[in-house]
Amino acid sequence: MTMPITLTIAGAAALLNIWLGFRVSQMRRLHKVLIGDGGNSLVAARMRAHANFIEYTPFFLILLALIEMARGSELWLWGVAILYILGRLLHPFGMERPGRMWMRSAGVATTWLILLGLGAYAIAIPYFDRVPPPITYAGR
């Protein structure tokens, strides 16, 4: 079974993860920090933005894949997946620019609401989306 939504979004997430890691490396090189954040707040902010992405994205991708397997590739699932990636793009910019805190808040809210919705939906699928077994009669 090909899962186009999960495959596309997992690929986008991998690219986004590389980009976030690259941004950390840029600041480490610039500020000559080999390990940790070296007490530099910008390095720390980029490290946390990268770590935050890594903390939430596996749960999102697992839920996305399982729901796509259970329900198929539905249009609303594409929308949720794209919205997740957009929210994760906003978050790092809000982390390092105090004047753009709304970006961080929007990224966090998007992530949490999507995970909450997908988590609840995943729990509901096996209990509310069942087809009753056919009735059979013994001896017939």
Image (cartoon, rainbow, N blue to C red):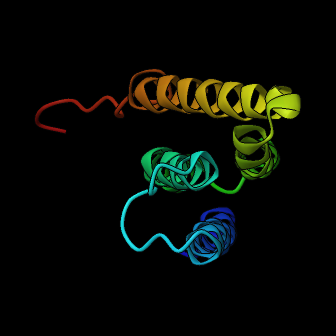
Give left or right: position of 137 versus 66. Answer: left
Residue at 26% x, 32% y: name it.
Answer: 136
Residue that sits furthest to the left in the current view: 139
Frontmost residue, 117 versus 37 = 37
Frontmost residue, 136 versus 58 = 58
Frontmost residue, 78 versus 105 = 105
Tell me residue 51's x, y (percent).
Answer: 47, 52
Tell me residue 133's x, y (percent).
Answer: 34, 33
Give left or right: position of 19 versus 61. Answer: right
Residue at 67% x, 64% y: name it.
Answer: 9
Whether residue 95 is visible here, answered yes or no, is yes
Whether residue 131 is visible here, answered yes or no, is no
Q: Is residue 70 above or below residue 116?
A: below
Tell me residue 104's x, y (percent).
Answer: 74, 33
Tell me residue 89's x, y (percent).
Answer: 77, 52
Residue that sits furthest to the right in the current view: 99
The C terminus: image quadrant: top left
Frontmost residue, 131 versus 11 = 11
- Tag count: 0
Q: Is residue 91 above or below residue 127?
A: below
Q: Quarter-wise, where is residue 127 in the image?
A: top left
Q: Is residue 8 above or below residue 109?
A: below
Give left or right: position of 18 versus 47. Answer: right
Residue at 69% x, 40% y: name it.
Answer: 95
